[in-house]
Image (cartoon, rainbow, N blue to C red):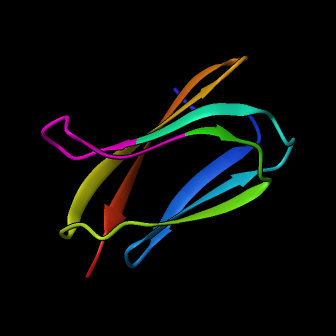
Amino acid sequence: NTLTNVKVYSNMDNVYIINENDLPIKTVEIYDIFGRTVYQNTKSHQSKEMIHLPVASGTYVVRLLTADGVGTYKVNILK
C-alpha cells in the first residue's frame, strides 16, 4: 500500500520522504530483506526528510505509519 501525496525514493545511501500534504507521520521504519529494523523514528512532521542509512547495498522496505493508514515502499540502497 502507498499513501496519497507521499513519495519515497532513494539516491545512493539516502532515503528521501516527500510529504506533499504535510500528513503527520507517526513512525518511519526501515527494514532489510530479512525483516530486521535498520532505522526507526517517531513523530516525523517534516514535509521533506532525508535519512542517511549506513547499511550495506541492497533492497530495503520503508514503512510509514500515519493516522490515514500505513504506507509501504521499496527502496534500493547503493554504496
Q: Is residue 69 left or right of residue 36?
A: right
Q: Is residue 11 above or below residue 20?
A: below
Image x and y of residue 66, in percent? 67, 24
For image coordinates 19% across by 34% down, the residue present is 35
Q: Residue furthest left?
A: 34
Relative to the observer, which residue lies in front, 35 or 38?
A: 38
The residue lying toward the viewer, choosing from 52 and 17, is 52
User: In x, y percent, where is residue 16?
Assistant: 58, 62
Q: Is residue 39 above or below residue 77?
A: above
Q: Is residue 74 magenta?
A: no
Q: Identify the image quadrant of residue 33.
A: top left
Q: Is residue 22 above or below residue 79?
A: above
Q: Is residue 3 visible?
A: no
Q: Residue at x 72, y 17 (%)?
A: 67
- Residue 30 locus on image (x, y percent): 38, 45
Give the magenta-colored segment's residue range: 30-41
Q: Is residue 62 left or right of residue 47?
A: left
Q: Residue at x 77, y 41 (%)?
A: 5
Q: Is residue 37 magenta?
A: yes
Q: Residue furthest front?
A: 42
Tell me where residue 2 sits by quadrant: top right
Q: Residue 76 versus residue 55: which sits nearer the camera?
A: 55
Give the percent coordinates (x, y) of residue 72.
47, 34
